[in-house]
Image (cartoon, grey):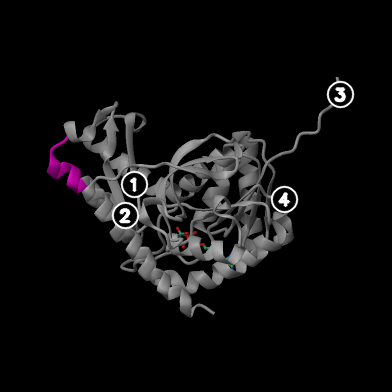
Amino acid sequence: MAFTAHTRKKIAVIGAGFVGSTTAHWAAQKELGDVVLLDINEGAAIGKTLDLAQAATMEMFDTKIKGTSNYADIANSDVVIITAGMPRKPGMSRDELIGINAKIVKDVCAGIKQHAPDSIVIVVCNPMDVMALYAKQQLGFPKERVLGMGGCLDSARFRTFIAEECGVSYKDVTGVVVGNHGDAMVPLVRTASVGSVPLIDMLPADKIAAIVQRTKSAGAEIGGHLKTGSAYYAPSRGAVEMAEAILKDQKRVLPVAVELNGEFGVSDKMMVGVMCVIGGKGLEKIIDYKFNADEKAEFEKSVNAVRTLCEGLKTVQ
Ligand code: APR
């Protein structure tokens, strides 16, 4: 039988800090493809990938892992995940990071544009919606290939708190968070269910309100405990959920920040989380979720929060 050449998938993770290195870890462990971890600090990228590759011999994952500071190494990546950037310090909002992280995103996008021009890009660094929009502008890629990770994380947090409150397995809980990845995010209580039973039939209104509130401040809650740095296990896993949907052409329905061009009444190309079909082409479809009046009002507030923050981009050199 003739040997058929097999093309392995390739994932580039930019930023080898907490979020980037755990992203590389999840992606390698799931054998999504070969992983390149790039950081301006070459030592961090190389050191962490050597460590991860040595773990692979015990965990038996069959993935090539390379650390680098050279963008030429990301050539032919199918997916590029941008995690480079400063995390929040306690008491800091995600929004205060704009100036610093936009400069980093600009550098990173120049490297991606030159060396991985056909990739699908997932933006993780904060303030995510604004950084995703900025990355899209810098890259000039079509909307299908620039996606923001926030909704997968916020929805996972929402489901975690529902499962814990109800004392049930995470596996049996649904619940989606749309809008921006910030304080104005919109946990859609109508989408929440436990074993297919609507959450509103499972818990009293005050308990649901507490879950919604805790979801909105979940990142700050973690940062408050950590004192330095911010969350990374769940953010990185959120990025890998999206990468897996792309690399395996899964057609997953995931809440992802994408450019809106008239959908939900947003016509100025803001990027904000909505339910999407994610597959081999990246964004394949935006789900036409019918907001009720309260949800619509909250969603509009959420989009406005991104719009206001985008003003901060005008001063970035
Ligand atoms: N190019 C490549 N890497 C860079 C650049 C750059 N221009 N600038 C900074 N970095 C790298 C740093 O060297 C560091 O290794 O980005 C990494 C950031 O890592 P951490 O400080 O550990 O931050 P982390 O917790 O990973 O958060 C990264 O993700 O969730 C968001 O809010 C978070 O914006 C933050 C980002």
Q: Is residue 247 above or below residue 198?
A: below
Give whichever of discs 1 and 2 has the lower sequence position: 1
User: Left or right: 122 with respect to 275?
Assistant: right
User: Left or right: 247 with respect to 96?
Assistant: right
Residue at x 65% of width, y 47% of height: 78
Give whichever of discs 3 and 2 has the lower sequence position: 3
Give whichever of discs 3 and 4 has the lower sequence position: 3
In the image, residue 94 lies at what x, y percent? Answer: 38, 65
Residue 80 in magenta? no
Residue that mark 1 sits on: 177
Range of magenta residues: 203-210
Q: Residue furthest top?
A: 1
At mark 1, the secondary structure is strand
Residue that mark 4 sits on: 76
Where the N terminus falls, by quadrant?
A: top right
Contact? badges 1 and 2 (CB < 8 Å): yes
At mark 3, the secondary structure is loop
Residue at x 48% of width, y 36% of height: 252
Q: Disc 3 to disc 2, how far (Cα)?
A: 53 Å
In which quadrant of the rendered view does residue 247 lie?
A: top right
